[in-house]
Amino acid sequence: MPALIDTGASRTVLTPEAIDVLDLPLVDYTTVSRAGGTDPVAVYAASILFPRDNLAPIELLQVLCCELPSQPIQCLIGRDILSRWVFAYNGQTGDWSIDDEKGLAVWVEPPEGVYDVFISHASEDKSFVEPLVSALKAADIKVWYDKDRMTWGDDLRSSIDKGLSNSRFGIVVFSKAFLKKRRWTEHELNGLFVKERDGEKVILPIRHGVTQDDLAKYSSSFVDRIAMDSSKNSVEEIVANLKSLLGQRS
């Protein structure tokens, strides 16, 4: 779609029409400053490709939904994208260039509210999950973990849905307790399956006290899926594998 670079805009914007066509997931609401005050706007999660240029894709970014009146464009590229590039403009000739030789756009520090990984688990497995979460954080991986992200009075479903929509991957700790539960564990797992509808790998299973046959009985979707095993793979191995998937150096 046609886009305009705006060095004065701090955030990237898509029009409501573009949001509808792309069917982007709603993740939050915020306010933007305009002449005369502020307006509430919706925030969506998006992946951005640049098919005409030799630029790395931006795999996850929060974009604002706003009208762009009197503009023949559907996207306004702001500094949240430009900060990942070296952008040069020659005012005398009108020439411009973007340097992305180092692949800076592939994955940089996510904006606030965007996570590398969502942790789906049964509450009975906190003794395994909490050391894993601590190790992920120590490796500079942004984690959505219910104990950290939810506080007294939060709406459980909307908080979980926001975390699911705004995470690149989902680690699912399959245990006997997880397989017995149905309400929230299945809600989280279904949300992760939705993210995989375009063939992208999102769900990263860990077997914790269960076998591959147990997983196959729970869901045929996991019959041929490679899983880590808490009895065979150390927390350090799990962290290293996730860093590799994220494109980060160990």
Image (cartoon, rainbow, N blue to C red):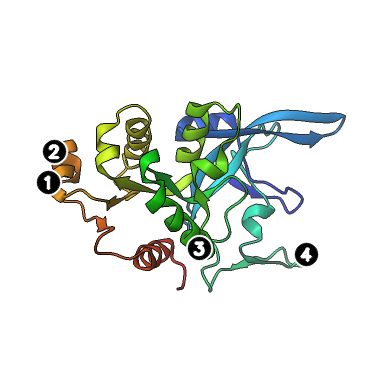
Secondary element type, mark 2: helix
Front-most of residues 81 and 205: 205
Q: Which residue is mark 1?
A: 213
Ranked by sequence position, the earlier of labels 1 and 4 is 4
The span from disc 4 to disc 2 (Cα, nearest Å) is 64 Å
Query: Which amino acid is tagged 3?
Result: Leu
Q: Would you name the residue on which mark 2 appears? A: 217
Image location of residue 112, percent across then percent down: 62, 48
Tell me the distance, in whole angstroms, between the alpha carbons under discs 3 and 4.
23 Å
Nearest to the eye among marks 2 and 3: give it: 2
Left or right of 37? Residue 226 is left
Say whether disc 4 or disc 2 marks the residue closer to the N-terminus. Answer: 4
Q: In the rendered structure, are the residues bearing label 2 and label 1 in contact, judged by CB atoms less than 8 Å apart? A: yes
- Label 2 sits on what residue type? Lys
Image coordinates for residue 224, horizontal then vertical, percent: 15, 51
Q: What residue does disc 4 label?
A: 91
Q: Residue at x 59, y 42 (%)?
A: 63
Horizontal side of 21 relative to 230 (left or right) equals right
The number of discs equals 4
